[in-house]
DNA sequence: CGATACACCTGTGTGC
DNA sequence: TGCACACAGGTGTATC
């Protein structure tokens, strides 16, 4: 579900509900998700004040004044939603109270001021962990991540070095979080289409000019998607419960058999499977 | 080292 | 209506 734009959307949405507020209590309703929750998580969260919310790749990092940081990953189906603020769970319908607990509400953070933040995750591929803030960068889940695609470290030179000699298809390589951190299946398909690069092309056989263009396009796609509040296919909701809207701008993703939207292209979007995951592309204009 | 398969889960849509 | 099956936004681990 959530790729970088969705995670950034959630981070931004959670910020007003969390930053500066104390976690009065943490309601932990199961032992763990993908991994067991850290030892004593509820006690370690209780009475900690949230200093700020950061994002690294698809992880939300919540810095606490206790000296620890809460790491959150939404997996495929995770949501973090707010209740108690004047936030619309359905656009236009404002909740000033707390709805009853839903199935798969695994953790509820009770915040100062009667605000709640609920982590709901049906598939339970999500994760929570706690570690001392200065050690968070070196966390097992973060230490091997490549550069942020919206940061200065991500460049055509970086891609060229990372892809050099690689025979794997570019689609697969862009999903490798060690090469660039934050892209997922949707935005890789969308970026390759805009860059007119065939998803099966060997990573090491893309020239510098095309890499330059690809870097710019990846940034554009991600920024447009953040602007649109992410993409809502089935599960995704913003922190206030709103839908994202970027799915209306998909050019290839989940659009098999539709005409290629490229100017003057008569192609038809195809679906293939690469490394077990669907790839959507136009065989006509992507080379 | 690189490439691939599989594992972890629930929910939904499709075709019979 | 029921059932079997494919598939879904991710990623660590095992295996060649």
Image (cartoon, coloured by chain):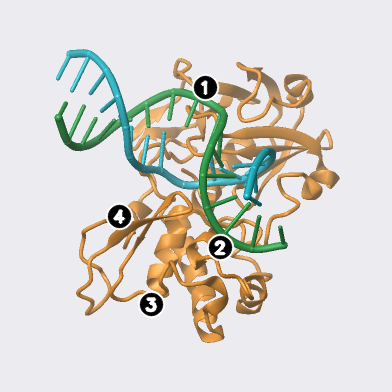
Chain colours: A orange, B green, C cyan
Q: Position of residue B3 (x, y in %)?
A: 56, 59
In the rendering, which numbered label is found on residue A105?
A: 1
Question: Which residue is disc 3 drawn over?
Answer: A287
Q: For the residues tagged 1 and 4, is the chain the same? A: yes
Q: Position of residue A273 (x, y in %)?
A: 39, 54
Secondary structure of the residue carrying numbered label 4: helix
Marks 3 and 4 sit apart, C-alpha to C-alpha, by: 25 Å
Question: Which residue is disc 2 drawn over?
Answer: A173
**Chain of the residue that carries numbered disc 1 in the rendered image:** A
Seen in the picture, residue A127 relative to A249 is either above or below; the reply is above
Front of the two marks 1 and 3: 3
Question: Which residue is disc 4 drawn over?
Answer: A248
Q: Position of residue A228 (x, y in %)?
A: 40, 55
Marks 2 and 4 sit apart, C-alpha to C-alpha, by: 26 Å
Secondary structure of the residue carrying numbered label 1: strand
| Disc nearer the start of the sequence (2/3) | 2
């Amino acid at each position: 579900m959530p790729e970088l734009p969705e995670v950034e959307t959630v981070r931004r949405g959670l910020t007003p509900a969390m930053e500066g507020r104390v976690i009065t209590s943490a309601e932990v309703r199961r032992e763990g998700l993908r991994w067991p929750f850290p030892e004593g998580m509820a006690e370690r969260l209780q009475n900690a004040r949230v200093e700020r919310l950061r994002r690294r790749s698809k992880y939300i990092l919540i810095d606490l004044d206790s000296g620890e940081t809460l790491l959150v990953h939404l997996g495929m189906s995770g949501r973090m939603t707010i209740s108690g603020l004047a936030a619309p769970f359905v656009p236009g319908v404002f909740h000033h109270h707390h709805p009853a607990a839903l199935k798969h509400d695994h953790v509820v953070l009770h915040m100062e001021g009667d605000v709640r933040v609920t982590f709901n995750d049906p598939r339970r591929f999500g994760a929570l962990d706690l570690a001392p803030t200065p050690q968070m960068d070196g966390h097992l889940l973060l230490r091997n991540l490549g550069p942020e695609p919206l940061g200065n470290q991500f460049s055509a030179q970086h891609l060229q070095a990372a892809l050099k000699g690689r025979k794997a298809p570019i689609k697969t390589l862009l999903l490798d979080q060690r090469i660039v951190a934050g892209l997922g299946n949707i935005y890789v398909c969308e970026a390759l289409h805009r860059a007119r690069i065939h998803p099966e092309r060997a990573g090491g056989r893309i020239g510098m000019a095309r890499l330059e263009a690809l870097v710019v396009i990846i940034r554009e796609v991600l920024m447009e998607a953040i602007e649109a509040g992410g993409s809502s296919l089935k599960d995704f909701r913003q922190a206030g419960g709103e839908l994202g809207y970027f799915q209306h701008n998909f050019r290839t993703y989940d659009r098999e058999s539709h005409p290629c939207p490229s100017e003057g292209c008569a192609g038809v979007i195809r679906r293939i499977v690469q490394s077990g995951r669907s790839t959507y592309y136009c065989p006509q204009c992507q080379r």
